[in-house]
Amino acid sequence: MTPSDRAKQELKNLQPVAGNGLLHRRAFLHGGAALAGAITGYALVPPAFGQQLTDESWSLAPGVTVPDFGVRSRFEKNVVRTLSNPKGEPRTQHARTPHHLLNGTFTPNGLHFVISHAGDPDIDPDKHRLVIHGLVKQPLVFTLDALARYPMESRMAFVECGGNSAPLFSVEPIQASVQALHGLVSCAEWTGVRLSTLLDEAGIDPKAKWIVAEGADPPHLSRSVPLSKAMDDAMIALYQNGERIMPGNGYPMRLLLPGWEGNINVKWVRRLQLTETPGMTFYESRTYAPILPGGKAYQFYFLQEVKSFITHPSPGLALKGPGFYEISGIAYSGTGRIAKVMVSADGGKSWAQAALQEPVHSKAFTRFRVPWRWDGGPAVLQSQAWDEAGYVQPTRTQLVASRGETTRVPPVTAFVSQHYNAIVSWSIERGGEVKHVYA
């Protein structure tokens, strides 16, 4: 390709491919100087100004001593989880991930979302035991040291609360940040031992069809897991992003069921009982069995379906005037890899395909990006994801038709307050303010 041809291609990449200024994703790869010049995120200064860069205080004296455990810059103190119960009262506690302040595809351990029904137990790893019993040929008990002798593997995987994004079941759009609406999902590299390896050693009775997993926290949360999932990609996870699992995520070990509802990924796991039937435990009979509009219980539906949402821009992150921006967000699916993400800037009238950040992992976050030239006028941003199994993220109208909707005043309609995965819409006002809308 000649320089002239390359310049023509760069300019072509900067031409809108969808309504309201969405550009082709190739602009990221081949836009080069054309894209950089269009963005102009720099300022021209006199040559003498460069000398001032060496005159700041931090350039004139030694810095602070390097700590034995690294901590982030003091200027990042506002990048924190929001807490539903900061005083630790005797009720469920939530800590939500600030997706609007993060980038990339994995969540730092200290910002990974947490739901604890009775706080985080302070477990002595030397005393903790994992027992496999029930319909097995030989019941087994494992210490942490014993598990460490087994072959380990690592995988990226998201964990999402079944109630994540539940506020979007509301009749009217709730004005809140990405953190408040979608903060109960995170993604990490988990390392541990395949559960199938341990079950094979215990010897599975042919009558066994389910596993009842129990945690060591005071409520002893128990969930029933089909044996087929346990023998597929389930893991007894011991590490989170390379270090021991955080207390709020199950230290010293948790059950990891990639792509499945978060509460089934039992934290602080201590018991796995193989059974013929599900345990019909308290939580799966009461809390995780909401009612569908037709009157049936939404029970033992484990899969977290294909989903996406835009994190930049989003409510709380106002645009600072017309010009070029990157629309970026997160997509994931419990059935495998993300195959495609489409983005709209005009409320779904037209769409442009986003670039997917490599590598694209199965059942893990995928970061999508698309260049956008905002003209300063009203816009409605949306994203829609497809996974490799062919599933498509539904519209809100489609989802509510099948699962119901909440109302703020009686009578309350039949509804499911879990498993919300519909398209999310952000409205951009003329002044750059971003609001949550239904479109």
Image (cartoon, grey):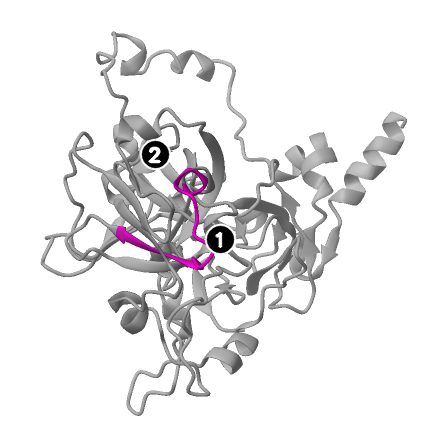
The numbered mark at residue 238 is 2
Question: Along the horizontal axis of the image, is 216 left or right of 303?
Answer: left
> Which quadrant of the figure has residue 224?
bottom left
* Residue at the (78%, 40%) spot, across then down: 11
Q: Is residue 122 above or below residue 384?
A: above
Q: Which mark is residue 9?
A: none
- Outermost bottom residue: 411
Q: Residue 108: x percent and y percent?
A: 36, 36
Mark 2: secondary structure: strand
Which mark is first along the chain, 2 or 1?
1
Q: Residue at x 46, y 42 (%)?
A: 196
Question: Disc 1 on helix, strand or loop?
Answer: helix
Q: Amino acid at mark 2?
A: Leu
Chain part drawn in magenta: 199-214
Question: Residue 218 location in percent, x, y?
Answer: 14, 53
Image point 70% across, 65% down: which residue?
Answer: 350
Please check the rendered image and state whether residue 252 is part of the magenta-colored stretch, yes or no: no
Quadrant of the rendering where the N terminus is positioned: top right
The quadrant in which the C terminus is found is bottom right
Question: In screen coordinates, is 323 left or right of 181?
Answer: right
- Give above or below for 146 relative to 61: below
Give residue 121's position: percent from left, percent from top. 16, 44
Q: Is residue 363 left or right of residue 248?
A: right
Q: Residue at x 52, y 80 (%)?
A: 402
Q: Is 213 colored magenta in this rendering?
A: yes
| Distance from the alpha carbon under mark 1 to that under mark 2 | 19 Å
User: In the image, is 258 to the left or to the right of 87?
Assistant: right
Q: Amino acid at mark 1?
A: Lys
Residue highlighted by disc 1: 229
Whether the residues at callouts 1 and 2 have beta carbons within 8 Å, the answer is: no
